[in-house]
Amino acid sequence: QLVRSLLSKLGLHTTTAARHPIRVFLLEDDKRRHQWFAARFIGDVIDVADNVGRARELLSTNNYDAIFLDHDLHPEHYESSTPDDEHTGYAIALWLASNPELQRASTILVHTRNADGAMRMVEELRRAGRAAEFVPFPMLEERIKHYWKR
């Protein structure tokens, strides 16, 4: 204890407080991304939905610190020229915007590769007074480190 105290005073030992575990919600259909998120939130609780119905169920019954939303949830949505708002992450963004009592304190990040879909989602959420942002997937790791530093 004395040695640690001396090292700390000399600036050679730093003490950091570990953050408490958080609860994370992930709307994502890609199983590889499920594993990617799990590796970044080790020690936290992660609930995953790959469709709109399951997402509504989880978001209605649990409180989350972080919500990650994908837009295109199934291969038929990728690169589609016609919107399918009822079966994409947009439906969840609209639903959260319409239910202001749910997940009020959550940080919402839209991580889809579909930038147009992402912006529509973020606009709906912000219009409803939610703090939401689009973070392209390649930049997501840095953002996670920024918000939920270990």
Image (cartoon, rainbow, N blue to C red):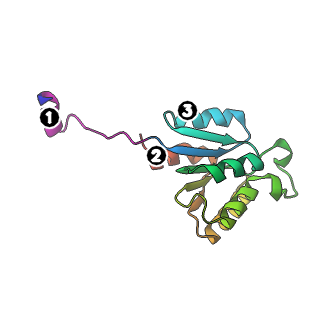
Q: Nearer the viewer, residue 73 or 58?
A: 58
Please give the name of the residue rendered at 81% of the width and 58% of the height, measured from the top-left corner: 85
- Give me the disc on residue 148: 2
- Is residue 20 left or right of 61 when viewed as pictured? left
Q: CA distance from mark 1 to mark 3?
A: 33 Å
Where's residue 93, x and y in %?
69, 59
Q: Hey, what amino acid is under mark 1?
A: Ser
Identify the magenta region: 3-20
Contact between marks 2 and 3 (CB within 8 A): the answer is no
Where's residue 2, x and y in %?
11, 29
Q: Main secondary structure of the magenta part?
A: loop
Please give the name of the residue rendered at 81% of the width and 47% of the height, measured from the top-left corner: 78
Q: Quadrant of residue 5?
A: top left
Q: Is 42 part of what is drawn in magenta?
A: no
Is any part of residue 23 visible from this angle? yes
- Give me the disc on residue 76: none
Q: Is 17 part of what is drawn in magenta?
A: yes
Comes first in the chain, label 2 or label 3? 3
Comes first in the chain, label 1 or label 3? 1
Please give the name of the residue rendered at 87% of the width and 56% of the height, measured from the top-left corner: 81
- Give me the disc on residue 39: 3
Contact between marks 1 and 3 (CB within 8 A): the answer is no
Helix, strand or loop at label 2? It is: loop
> Dot 1 corresponds to which residue?
5
Image quadrant holding the N terminus, namely: top left
